[in-house]
Amino acid sequence: MVRNDRFLKKWVEYYGTQLEKSHLYVYFDGEDQEIPDFCEGVHTRLIPKMQGDVVATDHQRSRFISERASELFSEGAEMVIATDADEFLIVDPAIGKTLPEFLSSLPEQSCWSGLGVDVLQHLPTEGKIDFDQPFLSQRFRGFLYSRYTKPSVITRPLIWGGGYHRVKGENYHIAPGLYLFHFGGVDLENLREISSLAERKENGWDRHQRKRERTISRLSALQARPWEPTVEKVRKIQTFCRPVTAWNKPTTFGMRYIVAIPERFRTLL
């Protein structure tokens, strides 16, 4: 579900290539929205704008998408994937499988997650992002952040929590070789443009954006670790560790793991 989202074109291009556009569903938050030409072939629908602050609308969207997923299962779907427009479920190119091939090969579980990789601008060395070029040819570091290890894939009707950060009543199953790349903090200038919008300020989104800005600044000062051993270590930590207050959310207990993204990912998106 989107509203005036700059990432949607890349989302449609990526998942349209992986899954075919006829398997994509995009809901526009607000009947004042215009459906862009690049969504031709995608299932699209304008809905009444969600009302409330950023937390309330997050939960409304998740409930709405959970209901639509249930409808798809009733129509014969085997799996449903839900992501935000700035999130991309990627199979490690070293595995040599497409996304549907990889997901079809997984053992039976009610939900599956990719390890969360928050791709953030490295302020000392990386300039403004070009949205028309592959992101991973311009950004070379990722924060292995448990917040983005989301149960994006479900195999039966389930209920996502706010922001798809958990599935109610279900534990996590993090698939080795699968990653959820998040690009919400990929460009500091873009963040500032978004947080300056009047409607974003009204629902409290600007505070969320300023928090992202601080994260970019702090993590820019950290040295990147090698990808291979670090992702394996963090996947194990997130598989077994849970916050005291949320048994079905992964955590690294505040430890910050920054990794260098391998060259094999560069042209994926």
Image: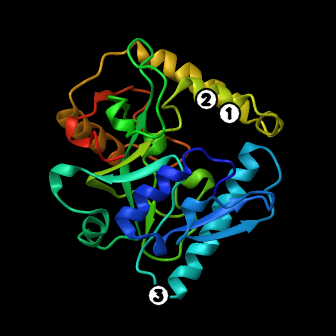
Name which residue lies at 35% across and 70% down.
Answer: 109
The kind of residue tagged 2 is Leu
Residue ID for mark 1: 194
Would residue 165 be seen by someone viewing this image from the given angle?
no
| SS under mark 3 | loop
- Relative to 218, residue 226 above or below: below
Instruction: State the image coordinates of residue 97 (x, y, percent, origin top left).
Output: 21, 62
Label 3 vs 2, first from the N-terminus: 3
Q: Closer to the camera, 146 or 189?
A: 189
Q: Marks 1 and 3: in contact by CB < 8 Å? A: no
Q: Closer to the camera, 178 or 125?
A: 125
Residue ID for mark 2: 191
| SS under mark 1 | helix
Would residue 77 be seen by someone viewing this image from the given angle?
yes
Q: Quadrant for the N terminus, please.
A: bottom right
Q: Badge 2, how many Cα within 10 Å: few under 14, some, many 20+?
A: some
Name which residue lies at 26% across and 70% down.
Answer: 107
Name which residue lies at 42% across and 16% down.
Answer: 220
- Relative to 131, residue 70 above or below: below
Name the disc covering residue 76, or none: 3
